[in-house]
Amino acid sequence: MFKIKHLRYKFSLVISSLLLLFLVGAGPVVSDQLNVQIERSNLFGIRSFVTSTIKLIPGGGGGRFPFGLAMDFEKNVLYTVNEKSDSVTVIDCNTNKVITEVNVGDEPQNAAFNPTTKRLYVTNLLSNYVSVIDTRINRVIKKIRLVGERPSGVEVNPLTNRIYVTNLRSGDVAVIDGRRDRIIGRVPVGMGPVAVAVNTVTNMVYVTNMMESTLSVISGDTNTEVEKVNVGLDCMGVAVNSVTNTIYVCNPAEVNDNVSVIDGATNKVVDFITIEDHSFFTVVNEEKNLVYITNPFVNRIDVVDGDTNISIAAIVPSGSGVTGIVVNAETNMVYTANRDNDSLDVIDGDLAGIVETIRLNHGPQGVAVNEDTNDLFVVSILSDKMHVIDGNDNAVSGTVELGNGPINLALNSETNRIYVANFSSGTVAVYDEESKQLISTINVGGAPDGIAVNKENNKIYVANRIGNEIMVINGSNNEVENTIVVGSNPEQIVIDNSTNFIYVTNGSSNDVSVLNDKGNVVADVPVGMRPGGIAVNPETKKVYVANRNSDYVTVIDSETNEVIKEIVVGKAPVGIVVSLSSNRIYVANADSNDVTVINGSTDTIFTKLKTGQKPSAIGINSRLGIIYVVNKGSNDVTVIRDARSGGRGKRKTDIK
């Protein structure tokens, strides 16, 4: 029985390589699309999320040329339409293994899977018919002829059991009854209809007319064109988000290089997604409201946040000539066809991406986050100030004057107090978030740097670099109550809240002092050169140490206090945080101006993200999955989304 949830996963439609060549050389055509371009800068780094590559069965005549893709989401089976070998390859995505190959007509283009009947419909451009494959036996059981001239795009509405086929040369859409696989109607549209998408909620059908740069809107109830929308030049791929009732149309011509965003309620172009070079094919993940856009000429896949219509990532495929794309929202995997390499890429849809840059001034240095209030606190070492930023809109809500040389800070979410280490004045400033007042200044001695709070016992631990000691402050009376001698030049501190153990990086003795819950040093673990940033994952029992002068991260087993791995990252790693929800570790690299993202399950590098200049500190809002990187050299904060944690767009918020 067909399940409604399978309607939520749409796939793109693509056209032949001959038409692609035609489009590149096509001259300008007048278009009446909205002429207001909204400029948005792309802040993400182009990177690869490809987890594996599936090679197709070698074919005669020089290869397969995989083009269109379709998927049975219930069985997690992928169907690849091979233009050159006139076949469809069937792949089990549970194992990424080829099951079989089915011969179809001449120069097949696209396919659509009908979960109601378990049938696959394949358009054959030069044969002028649609092949119907029974996916239970993987055989062609029928050829639907007289669909039109040069059938290209195909889409299924499982709720109505209707199949829609676009015909490039005859300029119409054939409507097929899925019960008997017979043509029951023909809808005239525009010139060169190439791709088709269906909104299963509204029963509206959308067809891109490439030769006249329009989008035909067809009523699935009456099988008539009800409206025609002017979009971009040489419009190609189309996709629908049935949840938001939004339509996306790729406009690959150089004068556009964008994607039209259309409101399905009004059939009006309401926005544009700016894409570098040519955008061709698109697909929507409705579960996460992400839009994927392929570009076979620059060989890139852009990932767009559907909430903001802004790019949040760019994916580099392993092969070349990336064309068809499909998303399985249940497994959160993306599949793309690499036409020139006879391969498919399997892409991790759990993206981590830069979503915003907050502009600051005067040498921002340290950062802390209040997850309860969603406030961000950033100290500026040159201005002796702390900026208070509302994490909901990244706007400044206040500025606090501090002591000389504020360098690091820590927050007690139970008492709503923030403790700031003032490196130059040898003090700790205490700020009350509720009253928004600086309520105390505590003398701690020479060069305080790292600072951490144990909210369970209301103790504050401050690393005194000159004295080679940790100052323990009682948060109840803001007085120093103990001093603990550690290694040489202690820099940063982290507390494992599950054990109350304290870990201190010692920059000159190149080790980590481990303190038990009573404050006694129980181990000194040798690490790399000039260890600084440190983070702990209490769930995996691992401690991660950033070694600035060794360019690697040391992984320590917190149960044995032994080094279990060293991970080479960027240049001069300084700050580090752990995301418990994704088990990813984010490392800020001061000299390579990027963040290394580590997979905590394997302790291997997942990807790298570009930041501003000279990142100096990093913080995390674990509840929202947002990471903040303070860039001292460019006076800004890079905002990174950990995996997919909700719609956030790029903005630049200037802080005076």
Image: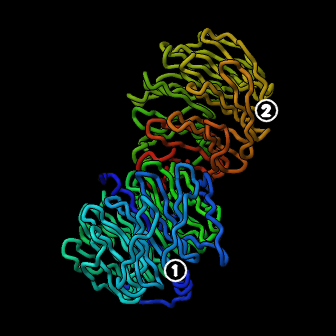
Residue 376 position (above or below residue 555): below
Horizontal side of 524 relative to 436 (left or right) equals: right
Could you give the CA–CA distance between mark 1 and mark 2, rounded to whole angstroms?
A: 58 Å
The secondary element bearing badge 2 is classed as loop
Specify which label sits upstream in the sequence, 1 or 2: 1
The secondary element bearing badge 1 is classed as loop
Dot label at residue 529: none
Identify the residue at horizontal 65%, vertical 43% (top origin). 588
Dot label at residue 528: 2
Camera-nearest residue between 215 and 423: 215
Camera-nearest residue between 209 and 328: 328
Amino acid type, residue under disc 2 in the picture: Gly
The location of residue 335, given as percent across then percent down, is 52, 59
Which residue in the protein does label 1 denote? Answer: 107
Quarter of the rendering containing residue 472: top right
Camera-nearest residue between 25 and 510: 25
Identify the residue at horizontal 51%, vertical 56% (top origin). 334
Identify the residue at horizontal 32%, vertical 68% (top origin). 198
Residue 164 position (above or below residue 415): below
Quarter of the rendering containing residue 137: bottom left
Amino acid type, residue under disc 1 in the picture: Glu
Looking at the rendered image, the disc whose residue lies closer to the viewer, 1 or 2, is 1
Horizontal side of 269 relative to 443 (left or right) equals: left
Mark 1 burial class by Cα count in 10 Å: few <14, some 14-19, many 20+: many
The location of residue 439, given as percent across then percent down, is 46, 23
Horizontal side of 201 relative to 231 (left or right) equals: left
Q: Is residue 276 visible?
A: no
The location of residue 413, given as percent across then percent down, is 45, 26
Q: Is residue 88 visible?
A: yes
The location of residue 339, given as percent across then percent down, is 59, 71
Identify the residue at horizontal 64%, vertical 11% (top origin). 519
Query: How many numbered circles are shown?
Result: 2
